Amino acid sequence: MKYKTEIDIAINKFIGKKGALIPLLQNAQDIEGYLSKEIMSYISETTGIKLAHIYGVATFYTMFRLKPQGKHIIRVCKGTACHVSNANSIMNEINNQLNLSGEEDTTKDGNFTVISVACLGCCSLAPVIMVDDNTYGKLTPDSIGKILKKYE
Amino acid sequence: MSLVIKVGLASCGLAAGAGEVYDAILKHIKKNKIDAEVKKTACIGMCFVEPLVEIYKEEKKSITYGDVTPENVGDIIDAFSKGKPVEENVIISNILKGSENKTFKKQKRIVLRNCGIIDPVSIKDYLEKDGYSALEKSMKSMSREEIINEIKNSGLRGRGGAGFPTGLKWQFAYNAQNEKKYIVCNADEGDPGAFMDRSVLEGDPHSVIEGMIIGAYAIGADEGYIYCRAEYPLAIKHLEIAIEQATEKGYLGNKIFGTDFNFELHIKKGAGAFVCGEETALMASIEGKRGMPAIRPPFPAQSGLWGKPTNINNVETFANIAWIILNGAKEYAKYGTEKSKGTKVFALAGKIKNSGLIEVPMGMSLRDVIYDVGGGMKTERPFKGVQLGGPSGGCLPAELLDTIVDYDSINKTGAIMGSGGMVVMDTSSCMVDIAKFFLNFTQNESCGKCTFCRVGTKRMLEILTKISEGKGKMEDLDTLEELSENIKKGSLCGLGQTAPNPVLTTLKYFRKEYIAHINDKICPAGVCTALIKYEIIEDKCIGCTVCAMKCPVNCISGERKQVHYIDQNACIKCGACYDACKFDAIKKG
């Protein structure tokens, strides 16, 4: 299995601690970028937590991803303030430039994954997107191209 | 006296380019050998003019500049050093006319007392502002009952939304007989349009930690959790640093102030589920389970985390505690109304001029909050409504602007105070669309446990979608109301119980707009795409081809210098042509 050593370190870090499953899955996701079936099965075998429970938790929370992700994650804020400041046009423009359709998708070259999120908490700068850990605010469809270029 | 330069480096500032400004300042003072101390601070709340830079030699004679750029910051520093400060873009100042001097004075900052003033990751800064002296006072000179009584007398009510009296909550947890108790801080601020908890955690993490330690001491808890949403990486980072510092200084850990009181504090990172803002769901999530709410009773004060008595308060509630202990319940209760004491932090967003964070005494009218403190409308369009309390709240029209801001008055309107998000809308927002937006959100975030919430919100969303497409019938409005009542009654937790509020309030205050969608098949605000159409006005089109180039689906045709034409069958109504046309030759209707 890929990343076995890293996953083992993560398991050892959390095993036996109270409420460890979510931090453990977060850690595992940081390692591989998503939670593969293989990793979830391995965690189940090693920790004795039932796979059904792990899968249940992984599918409940929106931050856990069960599919491989792009190199860069673009989070398009769809909070109230962004919604009334035309966040839809920002989403359309991003999908348009990256040739994507729908609310959540990864580009063919695997460089970007676009996700719409509820609120990034930068409402006064609406509309806002976050690329990896960087936030960009007061956007117009015209400003998207320049931002995407930085990550190509 | 050397110069002090402070840069606001919270998430909002960083998004506006404060990081670059900070680097430019360092470069400038190094290059010109200026004797200055450059400090990082967080958000003072004036997000609409970020990046913000404060500059002074004496703190009492400071100037805060807004919209600072890496290009102009050098001039600002040089001019200030020469004693002739730049007079443009002054936001707040004691010595110059600042554009926000007046609005700033109308605020009363208790929760935000240190935000944007101290360096959030410096415990030294916090200590200089009387930090941890409330903890010392409560542990050295007050009994546990006295602390709880002080909080009760202050009239502080839970700032997470429901407004339950905090002192009473502490009393319940104190009364519970168990050798193990927990205290939890709910920092899972999930309401879209609310960001006060983020700002407090980023800007003054120690104040929340101190409030928690005092609470833990009072109720007899020895372990605590801060459950923070993962979308706030900077808040989590600042909390981690602050916990480490407080542990080092002995405010956390074993034998605090030489007593038998031990307290250990952990951070739990959320994983993206709105329902986890509900206390029983939040505890399930800390335990590593799916975050689904549980039936109460038993209440967390009897049986909470891992079955132990647990007290849960919100970030803003905890941030009030140290101030109340230091200044006394009486002083706190001076602010506010009869049943809602103290101040409340609001996140102003949407079409308001001064978007950002404000803290005002309870009892101010919505009109004063929006027009006085918030500076009024940002656009030329008139005010249409204000959305309070996020997906659990409601939209209030202009007629209700004189409603005063306290828990009970707002509840009467059908909205709720909620955590304090206020999204101001002008006539470009469609209320059917807003109701649909929130239902889409709650329907997505419903955990699925209660049938009414799971299925009911879905049915409501379908009806709203139908209406927004011009396919609604008048009977649909009755069905919406009937479903709303049933969802409220048939749901276990706050998510379901309040999910219909955005629909009910818009139906109550903006019914005409629903009727226009149903009977006249028009969207008066021009938002619902199925009901609008873009057309080119032949007399105005000069054939510049800009619209055709902007169109993402290539549905605009026409030769250069000839009138263009939009193929209505292919048009996706994105409005790109409308925004791009410089000759107002595209009509939306």
Image: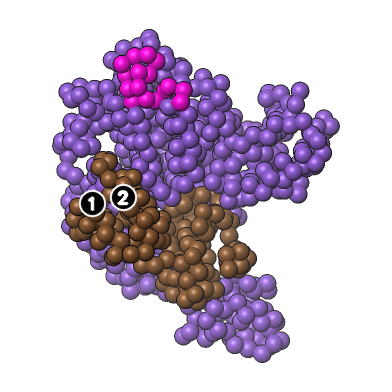
Chain colours: A brown, B purple
Indicate the position of residue B179 as horizontal and vertical percent values. Answer: 20, 24
In the picture, residue B100 is in which quadrant?
top right
At mark 1, the secondary structure is helix
Task: Count residues near mark 2 (Cα–Cα under 10 Å), then give few for <14, some for 14-19, many for 20+.
Answer: many
B188 relative to B38 in the view: left or right: left
Amino acid type, residue under disc 1 in the picture: Thr
B515 relative to A42 in the view: left or right: right
Answer with mark 1 or mark 2, whichever residue precedes in sequence: 2
Q: Residue B128 shows which numbered tag?
A: none
Indicate the position of residue B287 as horizontal and vertical percent values. Answer: 25, 43
Question: Can see residue B108?
Answer: no
A143 relative to A99 in the view: left or right: right
Indicate the position of residue A138 as horizontal and vertical percent values. Answer: 58, 56
- Which residue occupies the extreme top position in the image? B141
Q: Residue A47 shows which numbered tag?
A: 1
Indicate the position of residue B514 as horizontal and vertical percent values. Answer: 36, 63
Task: Please say whether residue B274 is one of the residues in the magenta stretch.
Answer: no
> Answer yes or no: do the residues labelled 1 and 2 have beta carbons within 8 Å?
yes
Residue at 67%, 49% in the rendered image? B20
Amino acid type, residue under disc 2 in the picture: Ile
* Residue ID for mark 2: A11
Q: Provide the residue span drawn in magenta.
A: B248-263
In the picture, residue B513 is in which quadrant?
bottom left
Chain for disc number 1:
A
Q: Are marks 1 and 2 on the same chain?
A: yes
Residue at 49%, 75% in the rendered image? A109
Residue at 46%, 67% in the rendered image? A70
